[in-house]
Amino acid sequence: MVFDQKKVNLVYGIVLCMCLMPFVSPAVALVLGILMSVLGVKNPGVTNYTSFALQTSIVLMGFGMNLGQVLSISKSGLVDTALSVVFVMICGFLLGKFLKVDSKIGVLISAGTAICGGSAIAAVSPVINARGDQISFALAVIFILNAVALVLFPVIGQYFNMSQETFGYWAAIAIHDTSSVVGAGAIYGAEALEIATTVKLIRALWIIPLSLVLALIQKDKTTGKVKIPWFIGLFVASIGLAYCFPNLDTTFMHLNWLGKRGMVMALFLIGANISIAEARKAGWKSFLLGILLWVLIGSASFLILTFKAWKPWITFGSF
């Protein structure tokens, strides 16, 4: 079905304006985007800015974060994320061999699961000289699981009566992409959102050591440069500015609000970007690998975090 582009532009404009309203939640925005994609209402001129909208929103949200809490979460989250990254990469390698998944697709899916979804895949792909079709396969798997996680995780958290803090850590460790982590945290509550966003961005820093390790393994095969997400440094800078200039608190709160509503817009654009054709191309073995890794890290982190909440005097690493 072909739609008049002017009408498509108008619809996108209306929905994006609606995303600024408090009654449009992150989940609703994502569903609206997916619905428009399925109906064939596409606007590449707008959806091409999805990544920029997401990253800019995260930076703006940093203005509303408490530096003391960020440092506290960073201290404990560092070991948590290290353990989860190593665990997922090892499991991904073994499961990929067992399922006979293309080795590069296996590395990309494992990196996307272990660290931060599409950003990790984008950073690792030039290091291992992945082809375009391999990258698209991995992204299709990660995106579909992200969409499921955004809806499923808050439901599970509510069912098991998880605290805001516990859910924030769980979402950051067990959900792939930053957008879905933030979306799930926003659905669950303000404290969960703050913790999930911070721990997730700490987790994203593991792109650097993972890429270096893969570069050493691939040193005779690659000349690609490692891409490091620029928004992590700006996110840290926004937190620092808010801490250094407390007299501008009102301005920073406005910027934080803009970041939160911008995140809702980004989730709508993510949904509108979905490609059913690419999802079909990925192949069942690639999907199975992604699902198994997701279930492993989700189940393991859930059990450890909830057990700690039940018996807080017992520690597992830094959990």
Image (cartoon, helix red, strand yellow):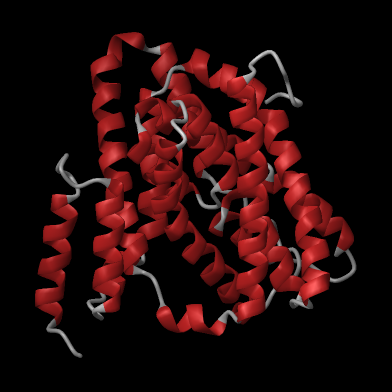
> Does 243 appear above or below 227?
above
Q: Residue furthest top?
A: 247
> Does 146 appear above or below 72?
below
Percent across and percent down for residue 106 are 72, 68
User: Residue 259's quadrant in the figure?
Assistant: top left
Q: Which one is nearer the viewer's eye here, 35 or 217?
A: 35
Percent across and percent down for residue 113 are 63, 55
Q: Is residue 205 visible?
A: no
> Does 40 appear above or below 240?
below
Percent across and percent down for residue 109 are 65, 64
Q: Residue at x 60, y 47 (%)?
A: 298
- Decide if residue 210 is on the left or right side of residue 56: right
Q: Quadrant of the C terminus?
A: top right
Q: Residue at x 49, y 42 (%)?
A: 231
Q: Is residue 216 visible?
A: yes
- Decide if residue 229 is on the left or right side of residue 84: left
Q: Quadrant of the N terminus?
A: bottom left
- Decide if residue 23 is on the left or right side of residue 262: left
Q: Residue at x 58, y 50 (%)?
A: 116
